[in-house]
Image (cartoon, rainbow, N blue to C red):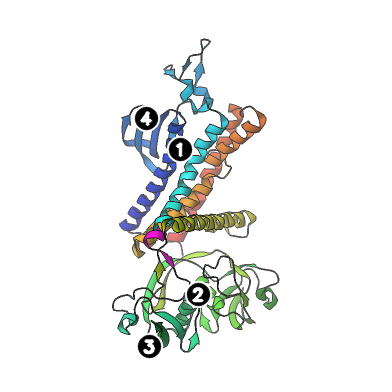
């Protein structure tokens, strides 16, 4: 784990925590609730200053933050017979600035503002990216080739459209990538179109090493009434080869299957100590989450979500998709759509985790974030920014879970109060928050155990 990884993770988490707490802070101020402390981190005060009634702090434990509001705990507010209020230390207090004395709707807005700010950050990041960088074109139109790459040496230019590979028509980048990996460095012939004219070029892919966290090629769920079920695949089967070519990761497997609609493929798999070969024909499909809207092959399997850190060799021509920049309104709509898509994926993951369909070892903690942030930073600033948007969505959704001590737990108390017409008693709230704290600490310890095993284990 390098210093760069740690710095990238600290910056990423710092931005996300700051935005989250800033949401609470700004809405509290807007609704005229007094804010006593705004802290990045928990525990011992490292640095800070006071501005008006608010003390701004940087604290020792950088795993979160908090906004402490006037009257956040009803027991801290004492109202005398004369109607004047004091805090726990006897200092005068304006009831109009007390969080506990605001209407339920106002408290709910303040609570929602933290996760809402994280969702908004993701939308803004995607919005800017779609305006500044753009969206990849669905057709195999290449962007600027990398310098000294085989594509640049062959005279390919940005805007060239790839029509065929080794004489076979191609429809998308996934198909091209799959064919290159299957060829394992063998020379290929590309048919490209430029300004209405067609030309043929011969290129030899070069090896490229990539490092990342990837899913292993192990089957989790087998979808009923799909080719995999008919071929006899089962949960736990580990696929080690496809069409005789070794595979270790789920993306390697998916590339070949997606590129083979209606064409039989042979899977070599391990089932316990037994080695089997099965032939399955991917069903031609147009899944709704396919941004290119083209036909791909599906056999009806999902990964078991066994994630490993892997250094892989891929075969590369130095070309990638061209991007079209979107005008602000279209970019905003695309940013919202992308945020919703990621949110649905996170909710799907949580649902599968609760159902037991995914192993608990897939839960990651701070070390996983450090590794992932470092890897994204090594690939480039745009990768790190995109990763920040995705983690921001994760943070928002996790905070909305109805667990006492999280924002979702506070929202649950507010909803109960709105229905009953009176707040949950302080005693019951304290009990619930203690249970929530124990649960949260247990999950964090388990996630840290997973992190340590993932980083230092076999």
| Mark with earlier residue (3, 4) | 4
SS at circle 1 = helix
Upstream in the sequence, badge 1 or badge 4? 1
Which residue is tagged 1?
A: 24
User: How far is disc 1 from disc 4 in space, using C-alphas?
Assistant: 14 Å
Task: Name the foreground residue: 415 vs 67.
Answer: 415
Q: Residue furthest top?
A: 82
Q: Secondary structure at mark 2?
A: helix
Q: Which residues are magenta?
A: 129-143
Pointers 2 and 3 in contact (CB under 8 A)?
no
| Pointer 1 with pointer 3, Cβ within 8 A | no
Q: Residue at x 55, y 75 (%)?
A: 258
Instruction: Please tell me whether the stretch drawn in magenta is mainly helix, strand or loop.
Output: loop
3D distance between C-alphas at marks 1 and 3: 58 Å
Q: Report the residue at 54% width, 73% height from top.
A: 254
- Outermost residue on the left side: it is 148
Quadrant where the N terminus is found in the figure: bottom left
Q: Indicate which label's residue lies in the foreground, 4 or 2.
A: 4
Q: Which mark is residue 252?
A: 2
Dot 3: element: strand
Residue in view at x 51 percent, y 13 percent: 83
- The reply, left or right, for residue 50 in relation to residue 273 is left
Residue position marked by numbered label 4 in the rendering:
54
Looking at the rendered structure, which numbered label has been put on residue 201? 3
Q: Earlier in the sequence, mark 4 or mark 2?
A: 4
The label nearer to you, 2 versus 1, is: 1
Let me know if residue 135 is in the magenta part.
yes
Sequence-wise, the earlier of marks 2 and 1 is 1
Regarding mark 4 in the picture, which secondary structure is present there? Answer: strand
């Amino acid at each position: 784990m390098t210093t760069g990884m740690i710095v990238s993770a600290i910056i990423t988490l710092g931005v996300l925590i700051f935005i989250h707490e800033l949401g609470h802070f700004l809405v509290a101020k807007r609704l005229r609730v007094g804010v006593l402390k705004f802290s990045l981190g928990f525990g011992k005060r490292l640095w800070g200053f006071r501005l008006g009634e608010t003390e701004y702090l940087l604290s020792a434990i950088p795993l979160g933050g908090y906004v402490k509001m006037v009257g956040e705990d009803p027991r801290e507010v004492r109202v005398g017979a004369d109607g004047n209020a004091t805090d726990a230390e006897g200092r005068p207090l304006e009831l109009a600035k007390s969080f506990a004395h605001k209407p339920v709707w106002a408290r709910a807005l303040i609570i929602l503002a933290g996760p809402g700010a994280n969702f908004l950050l993701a939308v803004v990041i995607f919005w800017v990216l779609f305006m500044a960088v753009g969206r990849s074109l669905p057709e195999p139109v290449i962007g600027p080739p990398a310098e000294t790459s085989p594509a640049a040496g062959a005279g390919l230019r940005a805007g060239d459209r790839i029509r065929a590979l080794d004489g076979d028509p191609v429809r998308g980048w996934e198909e091209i990538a799959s064919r290159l990996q299957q060829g394992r460095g063998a020379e290929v012939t590309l048919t490209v179109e430029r300004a209405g004219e067609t030309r043929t070029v011969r290129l030899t892919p070069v090896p490229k090493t990539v490092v990342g966290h990837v899913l292993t090629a192990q089957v989790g769920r087998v979808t009923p009434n799909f080719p995999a079920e008919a071929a006899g695949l089962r949960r736990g089967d580990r696929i080690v080869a496809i069409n005789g070519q070794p595979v270790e990761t789920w993306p390697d497997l998916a590339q070949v299957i997606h590129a083979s609609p209606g064409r039989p493929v042979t899977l070599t798999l391990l089932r316990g100590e037994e080695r089997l070969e099965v032939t399955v024909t991917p069903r031609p499909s147009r899944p709704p989450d396919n941004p290119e809207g083209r036909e791909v092959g599906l056999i009806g399997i999902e990964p078991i979500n066994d994630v490993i850190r892997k250094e892989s060799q891929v075969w590369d021509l130095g070309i990638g998709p061209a991007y079209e920049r979107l005008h602000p309104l279209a970019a905003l709509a695309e940013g919202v759509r992308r945020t919703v898509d990621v949110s649905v994926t996170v909710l799907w993951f949580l649902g599968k985790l609760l159902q037991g369909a995914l192993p608990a070892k897939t839960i990651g903690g701070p070390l996983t974030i450090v590794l992932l942030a470092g890897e994204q930073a090594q690939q480039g600033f745009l990768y790190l920014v995109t990763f920040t948007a995705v983690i921001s969505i994760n943070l928002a959704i996790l905070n909305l879970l109805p667990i006492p001590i999280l924002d979702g737990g506070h929202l649950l108390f507010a909803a109960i109060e709105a229905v009953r017409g009176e707040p949950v008693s302080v005693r019951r709230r304290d009990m619930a928050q203690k249970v929530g704290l124990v649960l949260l600490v247990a999950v964090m310890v388990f996630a840290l155990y997973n992190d340590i095993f993932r980083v230092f284990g076999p």
